[in-house]
Every structure is written in C-alpha cells, then in structure tokens.
Amino acid sequence: MKLSYEDKIEIYRLRQSGGTWPKISQTFNISKYNLQYMVRLIDIHGLESVCKRKNRYYSPELKQEI
C-alpha cells in the first residue's frame, strides 16, 4: 500500500506525540521497520523529503551552459 503525503505527515505526528511503533504499524498496515526508516529520514531531511515531486524540466540551452 502506498502512503499519501498526508498519511506520512500523520505517521510523523503520531510518533512525535508518543505513538508506539506496533500501534502505528498496525493502523497503516506497514512494517514498523519501514516506518522507523521514514521517520528517521524526516528527522534528518525534513518533511519535504517524503513529498513526491514532478521531474524537473531543463531547457536545452541551460543544459548547454552546464
């Protein structure tokens, strides 16, 4: 099951407010190890690290400059 950005924010909020890994894992039907990894990423890189983004478009002119 893929998690939406809102789900990821909710998981992070639950964990910060004292939620246990087994309870959160059961609620979202995700392995606790995957949840721990995701929360660690958010702690290190911020919430933007779990946000899905579109690919960036670089014009051919910009590519030539580089």
Image (cartoon, helix red, strand yellow):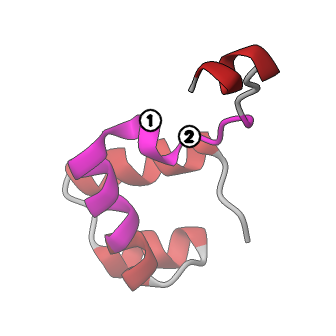
List x then y, in percent, for residue 53. 66, 36
Residue 30 position within the rendered picture, expressed as x and y whole percent measured from the top left: 55, 78
Residue at the spot 44% in from the left edge and 35% down from the top edge: 48
The x and y percentages for residue 50 are 50, 47
Between 41 and 6, which is closer to the camera in this rendering?
41
Q: Is residue 48 left or right of residue 15?
A: right
Q: Secondary structure at mark 2?
A: loop
Up-down relation of residue 22 to residue 35 (above or below) = below
Q: Amino acid at mark 2?
A: Cys
Determine crowd level at label 1: few under 14, some 14-19, many 20+ residues with C-alpha closer than 10 A: few
Label 1 – label 2 distance at C-alpha? 5 Å
Rendered image: mark on residue 6: none
Disc 1 to disc 2: CB gap under 8 Å: yes
Q: Residue at x 34, y 44 (%)?
A: 13
Q: Which residue is mark 2?
A: 51
Could you say where residue 36 lies in the image, as x and y percent from the top left?
32, 72
Magenta residues (range): 37-55
Image quadrant in which you'd find residue 60: top right
Q: Quadrant of residue 54?
A: top right
Query: What is the secondary structure assignment of the residue under circle 1?
Result: helix
Q: Amino acid at mark 1?
A: Glu
- Can residue 62 be found in the magenta stretch? no
Q: Which residue position holds label 1?
A: 48
- Which residue is rendered at x = 44% and y = 77% of the image? 34
Answer with left or right where residue 29 lies relative to residue 55. Answer: left
The foreground one among 34 and 62 is: 62
Residue 64, placed above or below residue 11: above
Q: Is residue 50 magenta?
A: yes
Which quarter of the picture shows residue 19? bottom left
